[in-house]
Image: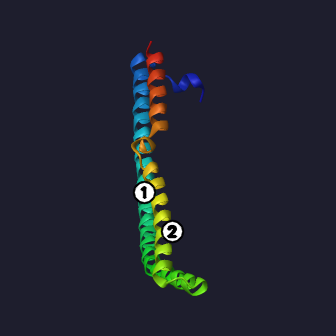
Amino acid sequence: MSTNERHVGAVPPTSDTGDASVTGLVSRLATDISELMRGEMHLARAELKGSVNDAKKGLISLAVGAIVLLTGLPILLASIAFAISGLTGIPLWVSFLIVGLVVSVIGAVLLKGASSKLSAENLAPSRTAASLGKDGELIKEQAR
């Protein structure tokens, strides 16, 4: 069968047929983008769920570790005070005072460092803000 025989009686292509195919392509593109976005959202949900589960396990481990540490630390500090008193011959209350002062100074230094890290300036997403500013400028330039 020749090419001419196949087109006998067929309607020649018109601009409407071309528009329909472009419309079909645009529709297919919109559908594909929608499916892609749904897939990305599904992946993000799955990753977030895994992250939340990991965070729960981490928090439980952190709580258990804190409980063990908080029960062992006073015993350790008392042992240090008794050792200072026994090795130096100073009164027991003075050795407890020395240990208490050292621990208090360490705690104050740690709190000072933590409070500076939690300041509003350090918590602000400065890199994201800068990136968004650059994106806004680029969009303004492109719109001109």
Query: Disc 2 or 1, which lies upstream in sequence?
Result: 1
Q: In which quarter of the image is residue 111?
A: bottom left
Is 113 drawn above or below residue 13 in the view shown? Answer: below
The label on residue 131 is none
Quadrant of the frame with the N terminus: top right
Q: Is residue 100 above or below residue 50?
A: below
Question: x, y (%) of residue 11?
Answer: 43, 21
Of residues 63 and 111, the one nearer the viewer is: 111
Figure quadrant of residue 139: top left
Callout 1: helix, strand or loop? helix
Please provide percent x and percent y for residue 103: 48, 69
Q: Residue at x 50, y 73 (%)?
A: 98
| Circle 1: residue type | Leu
Residue 48, numbered label: 1
Q: Residue at (58%, 25%) from the top-left corner? A: 3
Please name whichever residue, 25 or 43, is drawn nearer the observer in this view of the structure.
Answer: 43
Residue 73 is left or right of residue 89, and the answer is: left
Residue 102: mark in rendering: 2
Using the image as rendered, state which of residue 74 and residue 120 is in the foreground.
Answer: 74
Residue situated in front as seen by the camera: 53 or 12? 53
The vertical placement of 81 against 108, above or below, is: below
Compared with residue 133, is residue 14 higher up or lower down, i.e. above or below? above
Q: Can residue 9 be seen in this view?
A: no
Q: Residue at x 43, y 38 (%)?
A: 33
In x, y percent, where is residue 143? 43, 16
Disc 2 is placed on an element classified as: helix
Check whether the beta carbons of the residues at disc 2 and disc 1 lie within 8 A of each other: no
Residue in view at x 52 percent, y 85 percent: 82
| Amino acid at dot 2 | Val
